[in-house]
Image (cartoon, coloured by chain):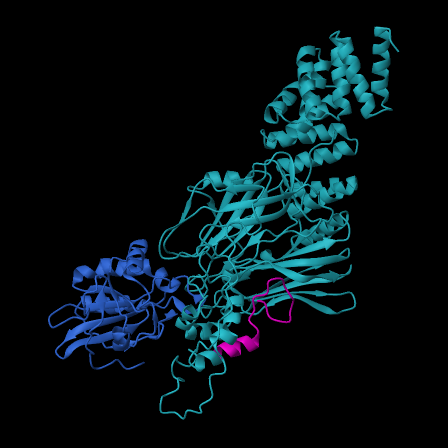
Chain colours: A blue, B cyan
Amino acid sequence: MHSLPAVALALAAVVDLSGATVDPRPGAGAGPAVVVFVRTDCPVSNRYAPELRRLREQFSARGISFWLVYPDRAETPSAIRRHQSDFGFGYRALRDPQHELVQATRATVTPEAAVFVAAASGPQMVYRGRIDDRYVDFGRSRAAPTRRDLREVLEALAQGVPVTPRTTVAIGCSIPPLE
Amino acid sequence: MRPPGAGLLGVLLAGAVGCGRARSDQPASAPPPSVTFNQQVAPIVLRHCAPCHRPGEAGPFSLLTYRDVRKRADQIARVTASRYMPPWPPEPGYGSFVGERRLPDDDVALLQRWVREGAPEGTGAPPSPPPQGEGWQLGRPDLVVQMKETYTVPAEGTDVFRNFVLPAPVKGTRYVRALELRPGDKRVVHHANILLDPTGSARRRDARDPGPGFAGMDVEMESDRFEPDSHFLFWKPGTAAVSEPAGMAWTLDEGTDLVLNMHFPPSGKPEPIRPEVGLYFTDEPPTRFPMLLQLEHDGAIDISPGDSHFVIGDHYDLPVDVEVLGVYPHAHYLGKDVQGFAILPDGTKKWLIWIRDWDFAWQAVYRFARPLFLPRGSRVEMRIAYDNSAGNVRNPSDPPRRVVAGNRSTDEMGHMWIQVLPRQKEDRWALQEAYMRRRLEKYPGDFVAHANLAAVLEERGRLEEAIAEYRQALRARPRSAPALNNLGAALQASGRLEEAVARYRDALRAEPDYGNARHNLGGALVLQGAFAEALPFLREDVRARPDDATARNNLGGALLATGHLDEAIRELRHAVDGEPRSLEAHYNLGRALAARGRLNEALEQLEQALRIAPGDRDAGQALAELKAKLGVN
């Protein structure tokens, strides 16, 4: 298991589709936040759209917020809007052109999820990794997942059960390095 | 009159990008990068990746420019090293195929090195991507058949396997030299098989299943005719449309449906698709007649849960020399190791194909780069191993369960289709006979094997053996109307008209709407002189197939014999128009007209009959009588 970053780095260049700066991580007193890294053209993250939508529908009423993060600066706001409407995620969309969230979470692929909770010292990441274990490798996937990691974390948080921070390895499209 | 017969079933990421970049404090003498995009990488990517990874093609993103490739560099290094991309499952050195997409080892190594060294662009200009064809690859088709409705692939769930029926609106018989499938969005379709259904059986299944098409991973067509499949009609992304070799066009008859058997992995959003098929015709009838032989042993598939190495096999001994043109292995998600090979009479082993890590998703038809000659007496063989353990992540059942053969994705199959070209058309019958006899070894008493073997024997003129095989088939399925009818036809051909009539009647008792039996019974009763009894069958026959000249002639003859002259003339006119070279129709029409007193018209018909068959005694005699009556010579 990889260690999770202990210190929350400040975000200065994570923006929503109108260009406004947004930090999706919860401040003091706020509920948990889920960020999921995706790209418009990654077939693996696209295939998760229905499951991601279900998670939002199920858990947003329980005080959890949901964000999609597009880490490729070449993906424009209009392409992202189109992607949102095609796949019906219903998440708020952010762009991370400087890879601040990528570095803060150490995400490497799409789709990869990170879950933050508010703590006294600032937002704390309690999970980073796959949504579930359906994909085992490129071209090797199960008919149905046997372990739904992200859902397990959200269920615990929704019930107020403390979550031991952990990470899993996600399979998907590599997040391209900054040029 | 030849009774319509026979046949029943047609049967690591590699080193992180950027690690190797030169730092400014390094000595200025550091060697320049030796592998660059513009020099070495672009030609590999454009040749091996870009055919699919470009706009409008199946790849999810484009790989055409430095930016495209640089962005995905470490993923490209990873998937080429693991051989996930480009997808080419056959083992190198075990069969050589057209359109081989396997990346040479040197190219894989080069890509790894390029990424390790920081994926530099290099100097100079990269080669340009090859131009992209617009529209149909083979030019404008002679006929385009499109699905009437749109089918929507659901956003999620297990992969979708669906069959769509597209009627081919051709008149008469056409020869097809090429077929091109445009599936719609190529990112949505994983592969497609195109089958021909002359019987409407797929149409009937479609009608029973709600929505466009019907479900099923594999589809088997029932056929009234004994015409074994001959050509692979297969589509997968990134493959050039196939034109059949010279002299090997396939036959498309009026009334035939094209059945598209398609595989869609859900994409995350609903995907509407509406495939279309382009057909390219030729006026040249085929002169070479390939045939598809199927090795299989579905009957032996019974895999216990947890069994990680379950093997089935099949073999077939070639009764004639053939050239092998292509091979199409097929198993579902439990398949792991698939082998096809031939043992020559001298004991030499020749590989057809070996796939060591079977992946259903990348199944394909493989066409040999050069036809593989196999002499008579060679044994072709397949071996397929399955993994039904929980360790097989593709196992559709969790926990694993007992698996037998079937066409659902949770069932299994073990097939290897082999396309062979015999030296002459007649050799097909020998191949078919051997094929059905082999099937009987695997499945003693099997209805399909006995019935098809009977049809082959009948075709080869071995009527007594054929009759015996039909009787065996009927032992398995006593009320099979096609088998009863075909037995009747064989009996009739061997001169046992009375027995034939009894079998036709049995067939109609089993299936009162069975048109072939009605047609044959009507015709047989006419031969027996039971015209009045024949009339209702013949009238129904004409109603069911108004364009069938034989049906019209049979009815006309019976009407003539029972004194219904005007109706007889009307039917026989249809018969003559439909089949202008029919001696019987002209002869019957001549006699009907003569009986009606229309002697000059009758003269014309009888003369025509004699032009068709100059020595025919009946027509000659009728003409002589008529001329005597008219006082001419």
On whether residue B562 falls in the magenta region, the answer is: no
User: In the image, B358: left or right of B615?
Assistant: left
Q: Is residue B82 visible?
A: no
Q: Quadrant of the C terminus of chain B?
A: top right
Between A150 and B5, which is closer to the camera in this rendering?
A150
- Quadrant assignment, res A126: bottom left
Between B386 and B597, which is closer to the camera in this rendering?
B597
Q: From the top left corner, tell me how far across and down residue B619 is, in percent.
A: 83, 19
Q: Which residues are magenta?
A: B90-112
- Residue placed at 53% from the left, 67% from the top? B48
On whether residue B104 falls in the magenta region, the answer is: yes
Between B151 and A100, which is closer to the camera in this rendering?
A100
- Residue placed at 39% from the left, 86% from the top? B22
Q: Is residue B571 visible?
A: yes
In this picture, is B139 found above or below B529?
below
User: In the image, B455: left or right of B25?
Assistant: right
Q: From the top left corner, tell me how far across and down residue B176 is, in percent.
A: 63, 44
User: In the image, B318: left or right of A40?
Assistant: right
User: In the image, B15: left or right of A34?
Assistant: right
